[in-house]
Image: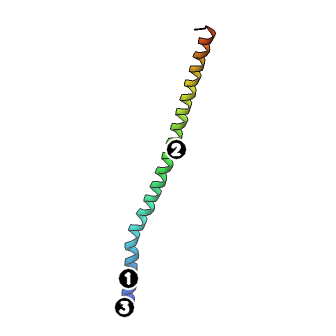
Amino acid sequence: MNATLADELVVLVLVSLVPSVVPIHVMLLGLFRSNIQALIFATLAVAYIGESMEALRNICAYRDNLLNEHNI
């Protein structure tokens, strides 16, 4: 009788642990996915800002060349 009770108690403890362990893995996966997403968005933002700055430099250089050619 005691062995059966012990077996059921072990099963009960293991089953009660599963709901608290599974959400931890899901939360860690969510954190990992969120960090990857933030890294991708930051990389895209830096690339966009860099391209914008390069275009602005080209416009300023073109303007300076025009001003120098016409001695203005």
Indicate which disc, 1 or 2, sits on the residue closer to the N terminus.
Answer: 1
Q: Quadrant of the C terminus?
A: top right
Exactly how many numbered labels are in the figure? 3
Residue 15 placement: quadrant? bottom left
Q: Is residue 20 above or below residue 63?
A: below
Indicate which disc, 2 or 3, sits on the residue closer to the N terminus.
Answer: 3
Q: Which residue is mark 1?
A: 8
- Residue lying at the far right of the rendered structure: 69
User: Residue type at mark 1?
Assistant: Glu
**What SS does tag 2 mark?**
helix
User: Residue type at mark 3?
Assistant: Asn
Task: Check residue 2 in the rendering and tell me which mark sits there, or answer none.
Answer: 3
User: Residue type at mark 2?
Assistant: Ile
Image coordinates for residue 49, horizontal then vertical, percent: 52, 33
Q: Is residue 53 above or below residue 35?
A: above
Residue occupying image coordinates x 40% and y 79%? 11
**What SS does tag 3 mark?**
helix
Image coordinates for residue 53, horizontal then vertical, percent: 54, 29
Residue occupying image coordinates x 38% and y 88%? 4
| Label 2 Cα neighbours within 10 Å, binned few <14 / some 14-19 / many ≥20 | few
- Residue lying at the far front of the rendered structure: 71
| Label 3 Cα neighbours within 10 Å, binned few <14 / some 14-19 / many ≥20 | few
Task: Check residue 22 in the rendering and tell me which mark sits there, or answer none.
Answer: none
Residue occupying image coordinates x 39% and y 72%? 17
Q: Which residue is mark 2?
A: 40
Pointers 1 and 2 in contact (CB under 8 A)? no
Between 46 and 25, the residue placed more toward the observer is 46
Mark 2 and mark 3: Cα distance apart in space:
57 Å
| Label 1 Cα neighbours within 10 Å, binned few <14 / some 14-19 / many ≥20 | few
Between 48 and 33, the residue placed more toward the observer is 48
Q: Is residue 12 above or below residue 67?
A: below
**What SS does tag 1 mark?**
helix
